[in-house]
Image: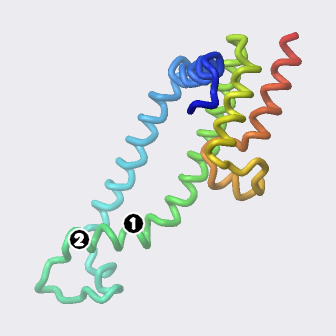
């Protein structure tokens, strides 16, 4: 990142420190552990289910179902709809955390440098400036740049 100045890097680090200070790192860790714990708990309930295996052609009762096959069947059929809903909820949670970390950096007095640093990084990475709002709400863990800059400008106006 040769395009970003030292002050912009400090502002971006202020944003990242905001994640730590606001507990986002630990909450994301806990949420991830709960997600995988739930997934594998429900997998354990389905692991020996012969009806599920038979529905996909594994109906030989004399042969055990390979674990990898059971995992694939579970995660691609039963868990998939649950994963879609949970992923959306986690994406919304992540976006809220991004706005909070931006607010933390703004409160440190680094709003202008954070805005310019994010814009430069966004340009360097060839990010979409104004993606479809429905698509980005579901798929992007970070809010679009335009939304973030707008929110930071509003916070800046409030603080003056």
State which quadrant residue 71 falls in: bottom left
At x 60%, y 45%, the residue is 141
Label 2 packing within 10 angstroms: few (<14), some (14-19), many (20+):
some
Report the residue at 76% width, 47% height from top: 129
Q: Residue at x 27, y 74 (%)?
A: 69
- On screen, 130 above or below 7? below
Q: Is residue 55 left or right of residue 127?
A: left
Which numbered disc covers residue 4?
Answer: none
Residue occupied by mark 1? 75
Q: What x and y, as percent, mark residue 97? A: 62, 32
Frontmost residue, 55 versus 143: 143
In this orientation, which residue lies closer to the viewer: 71 or 20? 20
Picture quarter with the C terminus: top right
Above-or-below relation of 156 to 89: above
Placement of the N terminus among the 4 image quadrants: top right
Mark 2 lies on residue = 48
- Give x and y (percent) for residue 157: 88, 18
Q: Nearer the viewer, residue 152 or 1?
A: 1
Measured as percent of width and height from the top left, residue 2 is found at 58, 30
Characterize the local packing of mark 1: few (<14), some (14-19) or many (20 or more) Cα atoms within 10 angstroms.
some
The answer to whether the residue labelled 2 contacts the one labelled 1, judged by CB atoms less than 8 Å apart, is no
Q: Is residue 160 left or right of residue 114?
A: right
Q: Residue at (31%, 81%) from the top-left corner? A: 51
Image side of residue 65 versus residue 89, left or right: left
Q: Secondary structure at mark 2?
A: loop
């Amino acid at each position: 990142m040769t395009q970003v100045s030292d002050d912009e890097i400090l502002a971006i680090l202020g944003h990242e420190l905001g994640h730590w200070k606001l507990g986002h790192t630990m909450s994301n860790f806990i949420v991830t552990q709960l997600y995988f714990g739930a997934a594998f708990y429900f997998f354990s309930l389905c692991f020996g289910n012969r009806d599920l295996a038979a529905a996909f052609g594994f109906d030989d009762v004399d042969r055990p179902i390979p674990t990898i096959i059971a995992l694939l069947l579970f995660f691609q059929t039963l868990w998939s709809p649950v994963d879609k809903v949970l992923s959306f909820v986690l994406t919304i949670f992540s976006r809220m955390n991004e706005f909070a970390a931006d607010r933390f950096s703004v409160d440190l007095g680094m709003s202008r440098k954070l805005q310019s640093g994010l814009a430069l990084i966004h340009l360097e990475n060839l990010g979409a400036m104004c993606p479809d709002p429905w698509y980005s709400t579901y798929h992007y863990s970070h809010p679009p740049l335009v939304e973030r800059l707008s929110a930071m400008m509003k916070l800046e106006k409030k603080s003056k």
